[in-house]
Image (cartoon, grey):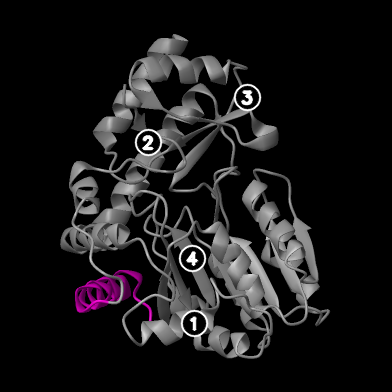
């Protein structure tokens, strides 16, 4: 039985988007693809409201974690960590031969601008990385406050993983001075996994031109060279381009403010439910709008809850890594609705005997 997805990703994909994926293929060096590429680029520029370079990579967003440090770190990288995926970025930075340090906080807590300020005063770093919405903990980091600190250091680039926040909340990329921002399409965009959207500032492109050993697949300069031809450097998933074209058309027709508002409405309903029966794991005021990590204060068997929900046609996620069975995560992204969410919460109430 197919399950409706309330996991932190991939998110639920509606039938219209799935149908777009089945459109006939075209050659990725053809005029037809160039037209498709240009349409998608134009809609992304409207949706993201940025003057920066916009590129699309047929890959997971993890590839851009690697690509960003390969392209931008000349001296030393500072990775802000607050959960599994931000910690993974620190690991990736080191595995790519880059000098790096991490500033971490307890899982469930946000990164703070104060700790970043003191680190940057050392002058050791030329790149800072942060995860906006940490999918393992449900924490939404204070991006504006962190960006204000980075801005004071003119030679430091700020790179943001917006995997579970882009297309869920508004990210004023240009206003905040973010140098690279990326997200896979399988979360807020409500597409299948396999395509990543990323933006790059002029400063980022200039830095990339000075860095050796950028690799090829994620070389920002190669993306720009082919972008000028309305193409991608390597063979893309043409099907994803069709699906993204339709998704952006639907979001812009709805109005992106309404698109963001529906996500926030589902997030607030889930937090209200979690606070009544359990506890929200993220510190109050720093909760993600994409997913809610629920602190398992009742010590239920999350695995058993997942099994019971699966029998009713729903899927949620257990806690991630060291939080397995200590939390469970409810995603509210993509093509699920508030009505769908209410059905899930009623099912959990019924399975657990909650009043």
Which residue, given by chain and number where applicable, does mark 2 sit on? Answer: 269
Q: Position of residue 131 (x, y in %)?
A: 59, 59
Q: CA distance from mark 4 to mark 1?
A: 17 Å
Q: Which comes sooner in the sequence, label 4 or label 2?
A: 4
Which residue, given by chain and number where applicable, does mark 1 sit on? Answer: 222
Choose mark 4 or mark 2, whichever is in front.
4
Local packing at callout 1 (Cα closer than 10 Å; few below 14, some 14-19, many 20+) is some
Choose mark 3 or mark 4, whichever is in front.
4
Q: Which mark is residue 325?
A: 3
Q: Which residues are magenta?
A: 30-51
Disc 3, disc 1: CB below 8 Å? no
Position of residue 1 in the picture relative to residue 122 (left or right): left
Observer-nearest residue: 153 or 181? 181
Q: CA distance from mark 3 to mark 1?
A: 44 Å
Q: CA distance from mark 3 to mark 4?
A: 30 Å
Mark 3, secondary structure of its residue: loop
Q: Position of residue 335 (x, y in %)?
A: 28, 43
Mark 4, secondary structure of its residue: strand
Which residue, given by chain and number where applicable, does mark 4 sit on? Answer: 182
């Amino acid at each position: 039985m197919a399950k409706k997805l309330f996991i932190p990703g991939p998110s639920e994909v509606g039938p219209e988007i799935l149908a777009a994926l089945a459109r006939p293929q075209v050659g990725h060096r053809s005029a037809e693809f160039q037209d498709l590429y240009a349409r998608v680029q134009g809609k992304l520029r409207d949706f993201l409201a940025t003057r920066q370079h916009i590129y699309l990579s047929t890959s997971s967003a993890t590839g851009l974690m690697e690509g960003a440090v390969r392209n931008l770190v000349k001296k030393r990288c500072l990775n802000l960590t607050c959960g599994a995926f931000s910690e993974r970025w620190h690991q990736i930075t080191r595995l790519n031969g880059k000098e790096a340090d991490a500033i971490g906080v307890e899982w469930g807590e946000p990164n703070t601008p104060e700790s970043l300020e003191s680190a940057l005063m050392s002058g050791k770093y030329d790149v800072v990385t942060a995860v906006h919405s940490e999918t393992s903990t449900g924490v939404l980091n204070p991006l504006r406050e962190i960006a204000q600190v980075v801005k004071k250091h003119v030679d430091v680039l700020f790179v943001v993983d917006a995997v579970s926040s882009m297309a869920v909340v508004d990210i004023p990329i240009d206003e905040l001075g973010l140098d690279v921002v990326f997200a896979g399409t399988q979360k807020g965009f409500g597409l299948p996994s396999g395509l990543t959207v990323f933006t790059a500032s002029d400063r980022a492109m200039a830095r990339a031109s000075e860095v050796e050993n950028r690799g090829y697949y994620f070389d920002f300069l190669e993306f720009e060279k082919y972008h000028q031809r309305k193409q991608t450097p390597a063979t893309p998933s043409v099907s994803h381009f069709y699906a993204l074209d339709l998704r952006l058309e639907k979001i812009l027709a709805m109005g992106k403010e309404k698109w963001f508002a529906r996500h926030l409405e589902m997030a607030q309903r889930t937090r209200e439910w979690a606070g009544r029966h359990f506890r929200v794991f993220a510190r109050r005021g720093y909760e993600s709008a994409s997913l809610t990590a629920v602190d398992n204060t009742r010590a239920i068997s999350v695995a058993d809850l997942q099994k019971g929900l699966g029998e009713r046609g729903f899927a949620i996620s257990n806690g991630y890594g060291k939080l397995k069975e200590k939390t469970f995560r409810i995603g509210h992204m993509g093509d699920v609705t508030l009505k769908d969410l209410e059905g899930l919460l009623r099912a959990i109430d019924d399975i657990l005997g909650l009043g």
